[in-house]
């Protein structure tokens, strides 16, 4: 199983060769959207490990001002490793705002809207089931000799925090439902057009080509 930073670095290198500084800048800007970042030292260590595993190699990028840069280029093996992750089954994380879903959605966009729709539906099913779960009040944070007023305040705190969690979950579910509808609107017309091509139409086209 490759790590989250492996996925991000491989995904960025899949698009184009980049320096460690390029990856750092990308994460500083777009990592916040996904809820993930990494220190510069970790990024460079990860790039070194990618080269050691033959997932990437380096080339010199001459610069007119300052020292030459080191560009990292994805190897065929790196492509294979990334695609193996991109096509692997997705398992939602317990935490609703965990970066795994955002990272998966962003870095599998090359697989098209149908794959994105499957991913969103998997996440939506999990979040709906999770939202149905109830979390009963548990007074064990209080000492055994707590006064009734302390119990009342503890219960109030439980209700406030529980409501916050349910509100955040409801907002996420609403976004997932909206996104599912948008993706379905993209995917279903494509599937309908593909299904509307009959075998005799293909044969007629072949006759015309010949």
Image (spheres, helix red, strand yellow):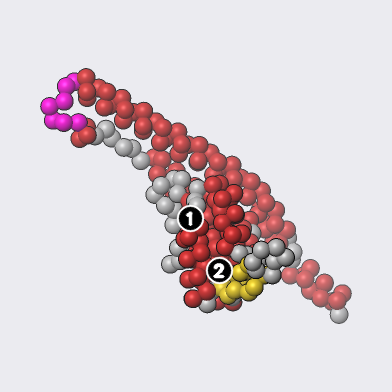
- Decide whether residue 124 is among the magenta residues: no
The secondary structure type at the circle numbered 2 is helix
Q: Which residue is mark 1?
A: 39
**In front of the other: 190 or 29:** 29
Q: Which mark is residue 73?
A: none
Residue occupying image coordinates x 44% and y 57%: 91
Residue 109 found in image quarter: bottom right
**In front of the other: 94 or 89:** 94
Report the side of 46 relative to 179 (left or right): left
Q: Can the viewer see residue 101 in this picture?
A: no
Number of marks: 2
Q: Who comes first in sequence, dot 2 or dot 1?
A: 1
How many other residues sit within 10 Å of disc 2, few (<14), some (14-19) or many (≥20)? some
Could you tell me residue 129's position as x and y percent?
Answer: 41, 45
Could you tell me residue 41's position as x and y percent?
Answer: 48, 60
- Decide whether residue 145 is among the magenta residues: yes
Residue at the outermost top position: 149
**In front of the other: 174 or 72:** 72
Specify the segment rendered in magenta: 142-148
Q: Which of the two marks, 2 or 1, is nearer to us in this view?
A: 1
Report the side of 52 relative to 202 (left or right): left
Magenta: predominant secondary structure element?
loop
Residue at the outermost front position: 66
Residue occupying image coordinates x 55% and y 76%: 77
Q: Which mark is residue 83?
A: 2
Residue 144 to residue 116: above or below: above
């Amino acid at each position: 199983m490759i790590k989250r930073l492996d996925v991000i670095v491989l995904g960025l290198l899949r698009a184009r060769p980049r320096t460690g500084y390029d990856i750092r800048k990308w994460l500083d800007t777009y990592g916040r959207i996904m809820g993930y970042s990494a220190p510069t030292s970790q990024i460079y260590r990860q790039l070194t490990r990618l080269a050691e595993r033959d997932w990437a190699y380096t080339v010199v990028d001459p610069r007119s001002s300052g020292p030459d840069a080191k560009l990292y280029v994805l190897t065929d093996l790196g492509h294979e490793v990334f695609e193996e992750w991109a096509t692997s089954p997705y398992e939602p994380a317990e935490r609703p705002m965990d970066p795994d879903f955002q990272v998966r959605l962003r870095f599998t966009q090359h697989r098209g809207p149908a794959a994105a729709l499957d991913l969103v539906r998997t996440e939506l099913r999990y979040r709906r089931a999770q939202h149905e779960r109830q979390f009963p009040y548990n007074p064990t944070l209080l000492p055994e000799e707590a006064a009734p007023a302390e119990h009342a305040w503890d219960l109030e705190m439980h209700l406030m925090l529980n409501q916050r969690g349910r509100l955040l979950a409801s907002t996420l579910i609403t976004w997932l439902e909206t996104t599912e509808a948008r993706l379905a609107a993209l995917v279903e017309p494509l599937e309908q057009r593909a299904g509307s091509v009959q075998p005799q139409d293909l044969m007629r086209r072949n006759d015309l080509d010949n």
